[in-house]
Every structure is written in structure tokens, then in C-alpha cells.
Amino acid sequence: MNMTEIARMLLGLRAAGWSEKEINDFMLYIETGEEQYKPKPREERNDQ
């Protein structure tokens, strides 16, 4: 992805209601593949 695509993705996630922590964790999951950062379904999240 280039920087324009990344910026659009981040803006889209914000518009979809994701928190900054959820976005950061998702980006870490994309880069590292570590399960601890993998997004969980909305029903499984404590904060929603």
C-alpha cells in the first residue's frame, strides 16, 4: 500500500467508528501478524 491508500484506510476506519486503539492494533496486526492485535468481532469487545 502506498501512503495515500493507508491514509484513506485510516480515515475509513475512523468513519466506521473504530477507536484510535483499535486502528493502531489493526495496523500492528497487519505488520506483525501477532494474534494479540487481531481485531475481534464487535460482540466480543468489552468496550462496546
Image (spheres, rainbow, N blue to C red):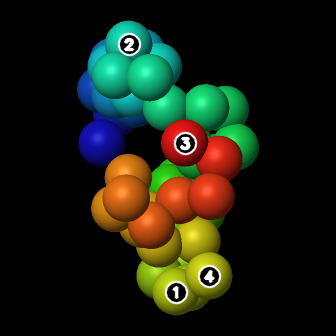
Relative to 16, say whether 41 is above or below.
below
Q: Residue at x 30, y 42 (%)?
A: 1
Which residue bears the numbered disc 3?
48
Between 12 and 41, the residue placed more toward the observer is 41
Instruction: Look at label 2 and name its amino acid.
Output: Ala
> Between marks 4 and 2, how big is the CA–CA gap?
24 Å
Instruction: Look at label 4 and name its amino acid.
Output: Gln
Q: Is tag 3's residue or tag 2's residue first in the polypeptide sequence?
A: 2
The reply to whether the C-beta atoms of the residues labelled 1 and 4 are less than 8 Å apart is yes
The reply to whether the C-beta atoms of the residues labelled 3 and 1 are less than 8 Å apart is no
Instruction: Look at label 1 and name its amino acid.
Output: Glu
Which residue bears the numbered disc 1?
35
Left or right: 27 in relation to 4:
right
Q: Residue at x 37, y 59 (%)?
A: 43
Q: Is tag 2's residue or tag 1's residue first in the polypeptide sequence?
A: 2
> Between marks 4 and 3, how big is the CA–CA gap?
18 Å
> Between marks 1 and 4, how big is the CA–CA gap?
4 Å
Relative to 46, say whether 19 is above or below.
above
Q: Is tag 4's residue or tag 2's residue first in the polypeptide sequence?
A: 2
Which picture quadrant has residue 9?
A: top left
